Image (cartoon, rainbow, N blue to C red):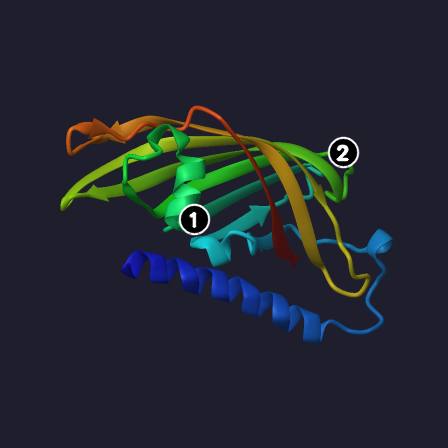
């Protein structure tokens, strides 16, 4: 539970930074088409947060690589049972209580626009550290989670560098390490599942 609380604090920090940007940006800031974006942004997923996920990404976008975006991030989750049944459909009916402890990852994206707006394609790479419980027993293991995606970064306001990034892709995972045997069963990784969400971010 302490690790999940740390994740919540990370997301709260991203929200506070975005709110400060909204109220402090000058009214005569450059319009969207002429904005001069910096090379660092913060981003998180507000859609999965109410469902138990906590995440924060720091994007690095060097001027020398105008179409490319990199990020490092952290992810943690304690989803409700009904969502576990969807995301881990191979374990449906097994009555596992699954958590993803704070886990590292990174992304790489390529933008069609050299200012890193609009359409982009890329890949999430995460190393989910699972803790799964049943009948007083516990298994801990790590799965490599891959999510090839297609997204669209949109700046809805002309005076602030806050953006939305809806995306969709196919998520799949495989066991990387640890022991996924629990109470006479195996916690099976999800081979492939469609996934879509909307990230929100602030560009410095």
Front residue of this view, candidates 61 and 202 = 202
As rendered, which of 199 and 85 lies closer to the eye? 85
- Left or right of 147, for residue 39: right
Other-residue count near label 1 (Cα within 10 Å), few / some / many at <14 / 14–19 / ≥20: many
Name the N-terminal-most of marks 2 and 1.
1
Residue 121, image quadrant: top right
Q: Pointer 2: what residue?
A: 112
Q: Secondary structure at mark 1?
A: strand
Q: Mark 2 falls on what kind of element?
A: loop
Q: Residue furthest front?
A: 93
Residue depicted at 51% across the width and 51% down the height: 48
> Does 192 sit above or below residue 120?
above
> Which residue is at 66% across, 69% downward?
21
Residue 139: give x, y in percent of width and height. 20, 38
From the image, tell me which residue sits under label 1: 74
Q: How far is the residue under mark 2 from the one under mark 1?
A: 26 Å
């Amino acid at each position: 539970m302490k690790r999940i609380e740390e994740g919540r604090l990370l997301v709260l920090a991203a929200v506070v930074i975005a709110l400060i940007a909204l109220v402090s940006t000058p009214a005569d800031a450059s319009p969207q088409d002429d904005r001069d974006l910096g090379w660092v942004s913060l981003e998180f997923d507000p859609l999965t947060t109410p469902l138990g996920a906590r995440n924060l990404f720091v994007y690095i976008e060097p001027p020398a690589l105008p179409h490319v975006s990199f990020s490092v991030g952290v992810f943690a989750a304690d989803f409700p049972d009904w969502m576990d049944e969807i995301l881990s459909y191979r374990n449906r009916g097994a009555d596992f209580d699954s958590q993803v402890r704070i886990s590292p990852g990174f992304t790489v994206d390529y933008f069609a626009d050299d200012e890193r707006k609009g359409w982009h394609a890329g890949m999430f790479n995460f190393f989910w550290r699972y803790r799964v419980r049943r009948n007083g027993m516990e298994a801990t293991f790590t799965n490599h989670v891959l999510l090839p995606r297609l997204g669209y970064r949109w700046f809805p306001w002309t005076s602030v560098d806050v953006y939305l990034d809806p995306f969709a892709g196919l998520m799949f995972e495989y066991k990387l390490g640890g022991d996924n045997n629990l109470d006479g069963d195996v916690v099976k990784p999800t081979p492939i599942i469609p996934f879509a969400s909307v990230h929100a971010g602030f560009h410095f």
